[in-house]
Amino acid sequence: MTTTRRLNDSNKVIVTAALTGAVTTKQDNPYLPTQPKEIAEAALRCYEAGAAMVHIHVRDDNDAGSMRFDKFEEAVGLIRATGCPVLLNLTSSGGQGFSWEERIRPFRELRPEMASFDAGTMNWLHSVVFMNEPRFLELCGQEMRAAGVKPEIEVFDMGMLNTAKHYLKTGVLDAPAHFQLCLGAPGGMEATTESLVYLVNHLPENCTWSTFGIGRGANEITLAALAMGGNIRVGLEDNVYYNKGVLAQGSQQLIGRVRRVAAEFGRVLATPEEARAILGLK
């Protein structure tokens, strides 16, 4: 019988709100924020609902996934101008065909608390190659360290987890690491409790971790993570529904459910200040 490791015995759970992503559209859910003002407003609603961190993608003027620096700059500026203490986590992978410079510039110049570090290449949605070649990942690690940005190491399967361990061993990434276990993407591991337990049991010691399930696996992964002492990501990037056939009226509604369910597990949502301490952020 497999024993599940609990790497976090705290009753605090960090909730990250994934606001928009690069693929979901307003046709999928009309509450999806796509432009900087909408993204900033959604970030504030999610903070008020209990999120300690927001994960930010941006869109171009036609709402397609983008890495346009001006869009990141505007969204981040609007959030910071409010004085909201929510932690900022910028994507480094906003779609297909972007140069290394386009992917790195937002976190290098805007200096959020965290940015995504996707630990390998995969066939994304059975249609395109999500390219994260070794030379780019090495550069990404160097640039994050230089900017004082903590990597959020995204892994979609066991191969990516092993790659991340290699980068921790070779110094591309620094310990203690923070992992985001991404489950349910076509081309990656399924969004099941079994998948989550397997990955958690192979995490390095003294790390922190969060997880999310895409689509129909979202609720199962949330419940499993709460039971296992993990942190959680929810939001319209990953799941546009609140219940089967019922659209969520914004990411904040999904956070509200996490708050209620977490209470049944004796866990409470971490504030941004508490999240900083848990993640070892300056």
Image (spheres, rainbow, N blue to C red):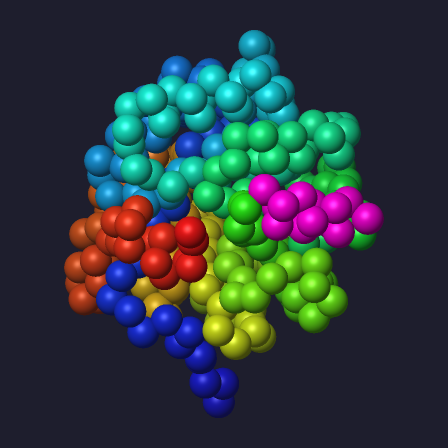
Question: Which residue is at 56% across, 66% downward?
Answer: 175
Q: Where is residue 196 in the image (x, y as percent from the top left)?
A: 50, 66
Q: Position of residue 170 (x, y in %)?
A: 74, 67
Q: Where is residue 119 in the image (x, y as percent from the top left)?
A: 67, 54
Question: Which residue is at 44% across, 79% downward?
Answer: 5
Q: Can residue 236 be seen in this view?
A: yes
Side of 111 relative to 228 (left or right):
right
Question: Which residue is at 63% across, 46% downward?
Answer: 146
Side of 228 relative to 108 (left or right):
left
Point out the stretch of residues depicted in magenta.
135-147
Question: Which residue is at 36% across, 61% downward?
Answer: 278
User: How many callouts does the rendering have?
Assistant: 0
Q: Where is residue 1 in the image (x, y as percent from the top left)?
A: 48, 89
Question: Is residue 137 magenta-colored?
Answer: yes
85 to 232, vertically: above or below: above
Nearer the observer, 219 or 234: 234
Q: Can residue 191 be seen in this view?
A: no
Side of 198 relative to 252 (left or right):
right
Nearer the observer, 268 or 191: 268
85 to 98, vertically: above or below: below
Residue farthest top in this picture: 61
Q: What's the magenta bit mostly, secondary-structure-wise?
A: helix
Nearer the observer, 90 or 217: 90
Question: Is residue 154 magenta-colored?
Answer: no
